Image (spheres, rainbow, N blue to C red):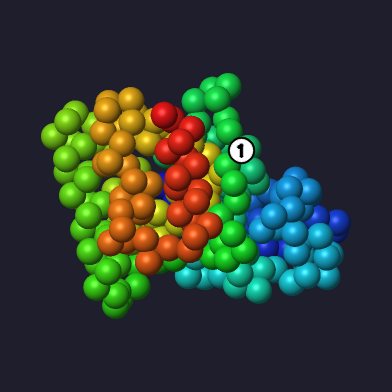
Amino acid sequence: MIRDLVDAVYRGDYRIELEFEDGQRGVVDFRKYVEKGGVFERLKDVEFFRGFSVNGELGTLTWADEIDIAPETLYAEATGSALPDWMESRVGDRMEAPFAGDDVSCAGTRRVEMEPLEIAFEERLRDSIRQSIRLGYNPIRITEMLNRYGGKGTAERLVRSGEIQDGIRRIVAMGYPKLSVESIMLEPEFKPLFTEADLAAARWRLDQLR
């Protein structure tokens, strides 16, 4: 289950108190993001950092509608709970993924109207899920994400998460990497949907599992 962020209060330095739709709350220290630089470089400016807002569509914290962090990650850090299964890496096998460029906003919710290419991409992902199920693996979390974020939003969240999830590990281990979200993103037909940074992140994830 994905729990949206509903409120955020600045608590000094790089700390923000977060409240989620289920009533859970906690303080998150964002210094580690700031120190990573990359897409988070702008957060070093405390005044810019304090200009965060809660994006109701995305259900997460954003800065200038350009930088955001997945609500699943924020919830885990604020409450001390585990990440969802689809975001978990295997124990002792965490890897540092490249950041997916300066524009890290995600789709957040399904758009009522989608471009034809987005519709085709989503259907391609759903077809890969059907094939995976026939092969004995049911990627439930990916289906949940598709239903909430759509195909493009799901793909962006996955490659920007900084984690290599068990789902892609399993489908690659089964010998069917072409069924992965990352491989489908890299199909020539769908490349125009994504930034070069997102595509590079997708390639990186696949390269780690070869």
Secondary structure of the residue carrying numbered label 1: loop
Residue on which disc 1 sits: 96
Tell me the crowding category of disc 1: few under 14, some 14 to 19, or many 20 or more residues within 10 angstroms, Cα based. few
The structure residue drawn at horizontal position 21% and vertical position 58%, both measured from the top left corner, is 123
User: Is residue 23 visible to us here?
Assistant: no
The structure residue drawn at horizontal position 37% and vertical position 36%, both measured from the top left corner, is 168
Point out the residue furthest to the bottom here. 113
- In this rendered view, identify the residue nearer to me: 207 or 90: 207
The structure residue drawn at horizontal position 74% and vertical position 72%, both measured from the top left corner, is 51
User: Is residue 161 visible to us here?
Assistant: yes
Q: In the rendered picture of this protein, how many numbered marks are placed on residues?
A: 1
Q: Position of residue 65 (x, y in %)?
A: 60, 72
Q: Position of residue 197 (x, y in %)?
A: 53, 57
Point out the residue furthest to the left here. 134
The structure residue drawn at horizontal position 16% and vertical position 40%, both measured from the top left corner, is 131
User: Residue 109, relative to residue 27: is it above or below?
Assistant: below
**Quadrant of the image occupied by residue 97:** top right
**Quadrant of the image occupied by residue 180:** top left
Q: Quadrant of the C terminus?
A: top left
Q: Position of residue 16 (x, y in %)?
A: 74, 57
User: Residue 73, relative to residue 164: is it above or below?
Assistant: below
Q: Position of residue 116 (x, y in %)?
A: 24, 73
Residue 162 horizontal side relative to residue 157, left or right:
right
Amino acid type shown at disc 1: Glu
**Quadrant of the image occupied by residue 96:** top right
Point out the residue furthest to the front here. 188
